[in-house]
Image (cartoon, rainbow, N blue to C red):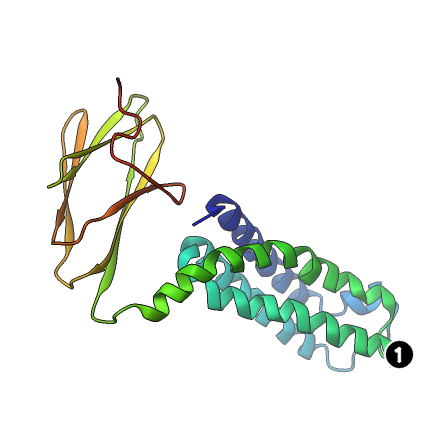
Amino acid sequence: MKRLKLHRATFILAGIYNILWGLWVSVDPDWLFRFAGMELPNYPEIFVCVGMVVGLYGIVYLEIARRPERGFILALVGFLGKIFGPIGMVYYMFIGKWTFAAIIMNVTNDFIWLIPFAIYLYDAFPFFKTDLKTDLTKKTERILITNYSDKPLLMMLEPWGEDYTLLANEEFEIIAEDCEQDFYYNIVPTENCISVYAEGNEYPRVYKDGVEIDCGYNREE
């Protein structure tokens, strides 16, 4: 996926923000009304429920950060909420129910997230479209290979005999799509090499930071 690090950072930040905002509102549901100079609500418990919903969205955003390729629909729901929420706010300001200062909630909850969410939706849509066409009898198998040492590590993709070299602290993701249900990876580590056997007929591809790399990557000449 393009801009994978950006998307993960966006949704980690969004998740943490939503959880903290939800906790804050649950503890002090009147803060926005005091800040905006509005009459305090008769039933602050309603705003506590709003905080609960926003906080739960934070968990959803953290899940998107964990698996960005599978988060299109979840992010779309959040994105639409960040559009419809300000529309409702403008309406209530127009009829005089809310003051203009209350828009601070939309600035921090909605406006600053619109562009990064839109970029993510653009990058994630091809994965969503592929999922719609995927045969449910098939599966996708992926595995992460990380070099935690300070020396290069040779990775062999078998049975094709393809070599890839991980530099210090590099991480590869191996993905095999449309696999039969009995497909699996067999990992055989040695001192300076790790062999990854794809036990099945499907040919897996190797990615670094969401970009596919070719056999011979970082090979020493």
Seen at 51% across and 50% down, the residue is 7
User: Measured along the vertical axis of the image, is residue 201 above or below residue 139?
Assistant: above
Q: Is residue 112 left or right of residue 215?
A: right
- Compare residues 163 and 40 and report the one nearer the observer: 163
Label 1: how many Cα within 10 Å (few below 14, some 14–19, many 20+)? few
Seen at 74% across and 76% down, the residue is 88
Seen at 55% across and 51% down, the residue is 10
Please give the count of numbered marks on the rendered protein: 1
Seen at 79% across and 78% down, the residue is 41
Provide residue 9's location: percent of width, then percent of height.
Answer: 53, 47
User: Measured along the vertical axis of the image, is residue 163 above or below residue 106?
Assistant: above
Provide residue 199's location: percent of width, then percent of height.
Answer: 11, 50
Secondary element type, mark 1: loop
Q: Is residue 82 left or right of residue 197?
A: right
User: Measured along the vertical axis of the image, is residue 14 above or below residue 44?
Assistant: above
- Compare residues 87 and 127 and report the one nearer the observer: 127
Classify residue 40 by image quadrant: bottom right
Provide residue 159's location: percent of width, then percent of height.
Answer: 10, 41
Classify residue 156 by image quadrant: top left
Query: Seen from this angle, which residue lies furthest top?
Result: 221
Classify residue 215 by image quadrant: top left
Q: Is residue 122 visible?
A: yes
Q: Is residue 56 visible?
A: no
Q: Is residue 22 left or right of residue 198?
A: right
Q: Amino acid at mark 1?
A: Gly
- Compare residues 169 and 196 and report the one nearer the observer: 196
Residue that numbered label 1 is attached to: 96
Quarter of the image with the C terminus in it: top left
Provide residue 183's location: percent of width, then percent of height.
Answer: 14, 57
